[in-house]
Amino acid sequence: MRSFVLTQIEPGRAEPLGLAERVARGDAEAFEVLVALYQPRVTRLAHRLLGWSGEVEDVVQDVFLAVLKHRRGYRRNATLWTWLTAITLNTCRSHSRRRGLLRKLTSVFVSPRVATAADAEPIQDELAREVRSAVAALPSRDREAIVLFYLEHRTVSEMSHVLNASANAIDVRLHRARAKLRQSLQHLMEG
């Protein structure tokens, strides 16, 4: 059993040296280390991108299956976390499209069901719930920008790489997303 040497990739975060190369070669132990290191971060990102839905576990599994499937596609010009972020974004986008299609089909073939108190998720903080709801209601491109910048603390440069857009385009996207959030949360700012 080989040990891993950790190297700093971001302040406060370490990545095992050679982990990506070992995963690319099909090393099962390296893949287990990758999952152990990054599953909490992938889960948090997917949770935020999907609008805090309950389907996150399935998406996270799909992310790591995609890592296995495309493990030879990792390029060293980005950190392993940047690559995982891109895979998570794409998986969440696919999941959201499938969920939207399923919702449309269900509305055609199934009669509406009355929600019960048991269906309601417990709400701890009304303000946080409203903010989460406003973020979840944003179009996916805007939600991705807000989540990556404010909740994942990614730089515009990192976002540019992950979202495959220029830094200027990311700045514009953030500006528009903030304006939409400001408008939808206006009632909170007035009170």
Image (cartoon, rainbow, N blue to C red):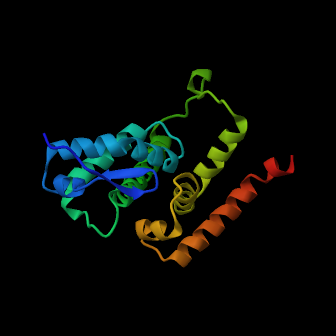
Task: Give the side of residue 176 with respect to residue 40, left or right.
Answer: right
For the point 74% across and 52% down, the residue is: 185
Give residue 41's position: percent from left, percent from top. Answer: 42, 46
The quadrant in which residue 74 appears is bottom left
Residue lying furthest right? 191
Give residue 17's position: percent from left, percent from top. Answer: 25, 55
Q: Nearer the viewer, residue 141 or 41?
A: 41
Give residue 1's position: percent from left, percent from top. Answer: 13, 39
* 118 w.r.t. 103: above or below: above
For the point 43% across and 39% down, the residue is: 55
Give residue 97's position: percent from left, percent from top. Answer: 43, 54
Residue lying furthest top? 118
The quadrant in which residue 123 appears is top right
* 38 w.r.t. 20: above or below: above
Task: Give the side of residue 91 with respect to residue 30, left or right.
Answer: right
Q: Nearer the viewer, residue 77 or 91?
A: 77
Q: Nearer the viewer, residue 70 or 33?
A: 33
For the point 34% across and 61% down, the residue is: 79
For the point 54% across and 56% down, the residue is: 153
